[in-house]
Amino acid sequence: MATAIDEGMTPRLELRDISKAYPGVVANDAITLSVAPGEIHAILGENGAGKSTLMKIIYGATSPDRGEIRYDGRVLGHHSPAQARALGIEMVYQHFSLFETATVAENIALCLPGRMDLPALSARIAETAARYGLSVEPGRLVADLSMGERQQVEILRCLMRDPRLLILDEPTSVLAPQAVEQLFTVLRRIAAGGCSIIYISHKLDEVRALCQRATVLRGGRVTGSTDPRTASAHDLAVMMIGSDLPVTDHPPASLTPAPLLSVQGLSGRPFGAQGRALDGIALDLFGGEIVGIAGVSGNGQSELAACLSGEAAAPAGRMALLGQDMTGLRADQRRRRGLAYVPEERLGRGAVPGHTLTQNTLLTGYTAGLVRHGLARYAQARARAAAIISRFSVKAEGPQALASSLSGGNLQKFILGRELALDPKVLIVAQPTWGVDVGAAAFIRQRIIDQSRRGAAVLVFSEELEELIEICDRIHVLSEGRLSPSIPRGEATKSRLGSYMTGVGRMH
């Protein structure tokens, strides 16, 4: 497998002085790099470093202001994503591009040439998924899939077109460790067949395990390149952020006498027949603590979060918020009583892509007086959005910036900041650092810890076991809709959590 451009070898991809600027920001500044046939090449950088813009330029979704792209030795001029796919260039975006009201097979059919023969395609999907070790059911609606399952659909959709250059933007953000290993096996196999892979990830240990070369971007410029297999995760992180990593401060918890959120006997399928049924969920969450929910994607995390936030009705069971019954309350009523929620899906649920950050602040700010008598107070909302941008170091043009213009990590910081600005009594956060760089991840985790130590009860859903062990005071595992016993932080190890995730541990 190639590790660099050998003398006389034509690069699969070569970028020469690629530059792209937007009003108020230079996204890419004279970027030059090359990727060999069969090479797995990492692109590293903080959120907002220009990685996603560069990938969109390669894929044809964005045109550079200047510079040259060569593909298999030939100049690739202005091109569209359709033309890129015809050349064998495929891309899996960090934010998924699936139609929720269509099935898996229908979504994949839309990207394949020829007539739509769903029965034959479904059989081909099942065979391809089995060959690559992916858990994809052709007949399921995308709306019923977890984020991890949707990620697998996106990857499979690309693999079915036999790519020559595959671009993966944070492909393991919502995958369990076992699924990550399966994915790496798949990627090494297709790279061995000559397909080049550009791999964007903030998980530095994964980069070290998978990639042969890494190019580091900072502020839109190439600041270095290295063989990640010979560098430590700390070395790579310092190259990315230009300084040592921040360390979270985790003071001891001081709990409220009574739980601020209590759940008893939560059971049933809140998302219909395709959803994961919850089975007798019982959970008490006290003020001053962080409780983690671990588990492999698709085991009921989305259903439980939706029931707690009010997005879905609980088929059976009782829930109490601050000592008062909230079982029948709508999401807005729960928010008015002190509950805040950061969903795992940023664009579309956490924020409206085509709305400004000011307008997105209004989505939840109505509980803090930003809406009175049905009228939005835009001046106050604009001021609050500006304060969030400043306090959480969000890289954006300002309150007038569209949510869709922010990188994934910066949008996550804004959404979390918007919720924390409400000073909630109960905070529910799903996948808090999905696709976030190491510096921003430490910042987000510290803000979550700080909120709990101010007396809030915090519930964190995450598939990052290291993250849960780092910030949580105790952890439950959700497996097949059932909740494990509570595991104190000092006793929570990856192996013990993994035993519950795989069904070896004894559940309630």
Image: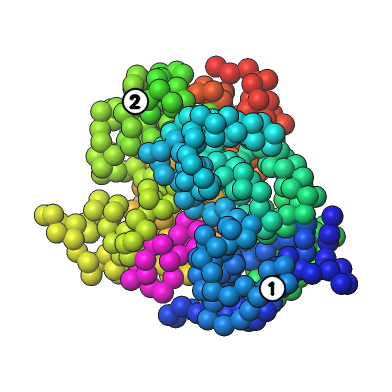
Q: Is residue 145 above or below residue 189?
A: above
Between 46 and 485, the one nearer to me in the picture: 46
Please name the residue shown 69% across and 73% down the image: 74
How many angstroms separate mark 1 from mark 2 (CA)?
A: 58 Å
- What type is the residue that disc 1 sits on? Arg
Q: Is residue 329 left or right of residue 4?
A: left
Q: Which residue is mark 1?
A: 74
Q: Which residues are magenta?
A: 396-413
Q: Residue furthest left?
A: 373
Please name the residue shown 53% across and 81% down the image: 65
Circles 1 and 2, Cβ within 8 Å, touching? The answer is no
Sequence-first disc among 1 and 2: 1
Q: Is residue 231 above or below residue 367?
A: below
Tell me, yes or no, whether the highlighted magenta stretch contains residue 318: no
Where's residue 27, x and y in %?
Answer: 54, 75
Where's residue 276, x and y in %?
Answer: 47, 25
Q: Is residue 379 visible?
A: yes
Classify residue 83 by image quadrant.
Answer: bottom right
Q: Which residue is mark 2?
A: 314
Where's residue 344, x and y in %?
Answer: 46, 45
Q: Residues within 10 Å of mark 2 (few under 14, many from 20)?
A: many
Q: Is residue 326 left or right of residue 249?
A: left
Q: Looking at the figure, which quarter contains the C terminus?
A: top right
Q: Is residue 286 visible?
A: no
The disc placed on residue 182 is: none
Between 201 and 474, the one nearer to me in the picture: 201
